[in-house]
Image (cartoon, rainbow, N blue to C red):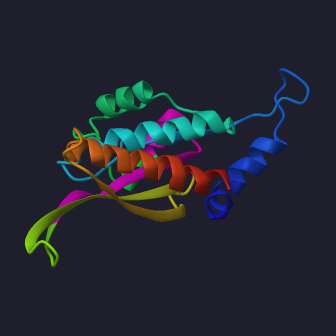
Amino acid sequence: MKSFFVGLGVVAVIAAGTKTAYAEGEVKKGRVAIMPVDGPEKDWGTKGILESGLVDIFVQGKRFDVIERNAIDSIMKEQKLGASGAVDEGSAVDLGKLLGAEYLIIGKISQAAYEKTEKQELNISTGKYSTSINNTGRVGVSIRLVSVADGKITYSKEFSKGLPFIRNQNKSGEEALGDVCRDVVKDDIREELEA
């Protein structure tokens, strides 16, 4: 799953091939801005989990300088962009130019829900019914890489995961969705971006 870095390949090639004047062998990093994550109003905290997970992935990868979220918020406030934190792609590209970013990472929570299913089964030997309850948290995430230079989407991918959880073990639906979202970031997105 190396498709993400095909999109980032241009930045990686530029970053790898550009030496700074400060120290021999030191590589200039590309600059990336991770935009506020968009999604449903009731997201059970998944937008924040996705955004912080993306920041961690890019900072720990050390291939790019990640523009501080406070700088993004400050410019958004100054430019009166997206009171909700989410901005359209055109505004995001303009924002990226103001921030000096080469690429924008735009994340969206497309689904954050949990479902409960009950099933009754008859135990033939006892003649009694028992009820089993299954809870599943499901999170859908999309990630896009947008070039600030021309506004083109150079990478786009959807991730979706559902995990069962047991509510009566002190786990609320919100906590379960947070766990699913962290799992998507940790296992699926990180694996895709680091491949």
In what quadrant of the picture does the C terminus appear? bottom right
Q: Quadrant of residue 23?
A: top right
Relative horizontal placement of residue 62, taking residue 173 as reference (left or right): right
Give residue 14's position: percent from left, percent from top. 76, 47
Q: Residue at x 65, y 50 (%)?
A: 194
Give residue 53's position: percent from left, percent from top. 47, 40
Q: Nearer the viewer, residue 128 or 2?
A: 128
Q: Nearer the viewer, residue 69 or 136?
A: 136
Q: Quadrant of residue 78?
A: top left
Q: Residue at x 38, y 49 (%)?
A: 181
Relative horizontal placement of residue 45, taking residue 55 as reference (left or right): left
Q: Residue at x 59, y 33 (%)?
A: 59
Q: Nearer the viewer, residue 131 or 149?
A: 131
Give residue 186's position: percent from left, percent from top. 51, 46
Relative horizontal placement of residue 75, taking residue 120 as reference (left or right): right
Q: Nearer the viewer, residue 181 or 100?
A: 181
Q: Which residues are magenta?
A: 94-117
Vertical placement of residue 62 versus 14, above or below: above
Relative horizontal placement of residue 136, taking residue 18 as reference (left or right): left
User: Furthest-front residue in view?
Assistant: 125
Vertical placement of residue 69 versus 53, above or below: above
In what quadrant of the picture does the N terminus appear? bottom right
User: Furthest-top residue in view?
Assistant: 22
Q: Is residue 95 magenta?
A: yes
Q: Is residue 64 shown to the viewer in this render? A: no
Q: Is residue 141 shown to the viewer in this render? A: yes
